[in-house]
Image (tube, helix red, strand yellow):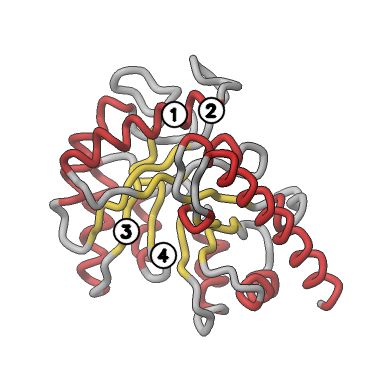
Amino acid sequence: MTDRKTEIAANLAKVEERIAAACAAAGRKREEVTLIVVTKTYPASDVRILSGLGVRQVAENRDQDAAPKAAECVDLPLSWHFVGQLQTNKVRSVVGYADLVQSVDRSRLVEALSREAVRAGREVGCLLQVALDAGASERGERGGVAPGGIEELGDLVAGSPGLRLDGLMTVAPLTGEYAGRQRAAFDRLMDLSTDLRRAHPAANMVSAGMSADLEEAVAAGATHVRVGTAVLGVRPRLG
């Protein structure tokens, strides 16, 4: 355990240095960017180490892994983000532990989240996942709403009991006009965030950037970066 804590602490320090350097290069304050550590495929023991090192935001993308891990770490001062594609039959479980769902991309999911949040007596934050590889009205390869659908979906979230519209999220696309152009993709997301905030000023969270491209996301103006591998190491293969 001591070796693992040393390893994670060293990795975390390197990521912190990268974020600080990216903020300095962009003329931003370090506190403008929040690190979310993606703990998917890693054990609850790693989450405990992260908490002990001061991490307060963690993310998961599979409910079957996240639910028992969150339950095991319920005593820790953590905010849990759900970042994976979310099926409606998993919503009740996810609402039980997730403080924020970053992958809201369709009206049926909004309705299910609202219903379960009200039932549980919770307020759940929502980010609209934007698919920059989608056509005018299609969904993206890895989920997400097309840019043209943001306004309608944002209004739906904002008007739904138990839900709070917090902003936008994207994953740099592998196909389409933004493939291999992370900075351009993140700049586009910031423009879409500006548009959203005209109607919903409090929806100012922009989640973008991962281990390989967090610098581009910070340069574009992201408020949150989601980093897994750079902090916890190369993930074991999932069977």
Question: Mark 2 sits on what residue?
Answer: 183
Look at the picture and state if 31 lies above or below 75.
Answer: above
Cα–Cα gap, marks 3 and 4: 9 Å
Inspect the image, locate mark 2, and give the three-letter code of the amino acid beneath it.
Arg
Q: Amino acid at mark 3?
A: Gly
**Amino acid type at image mark 1:** Asp
Q: Which mark is residue 125?
A: 3
Of the two numbered discs 2 and 4 in the rendering, the one whose residue sits closer to the viewer? 2
Which callout, 2 or 4, points at the residue further toward the start of the chain?
4
Give the answer, above or below, for where 154 lies relative to 136. Answer: below
Q: Is residue 179 left or right of 159 when viewed as pictured?
A: right
Q: Nearer the viewer, mark 3 or mark 2?
A: 2
Residue 144, horizontal then vertical, whole percent: 39, 35
Dot label at residue 187: 1
Check disc 2: other Cα within 10 Å, few if <14, some if 14-19, many if 20+.
many
Give the residue displayed 53% in from the left and 55% down from the top: 30
Disc 4 + disc 1, Cβ < 8 Å:
no
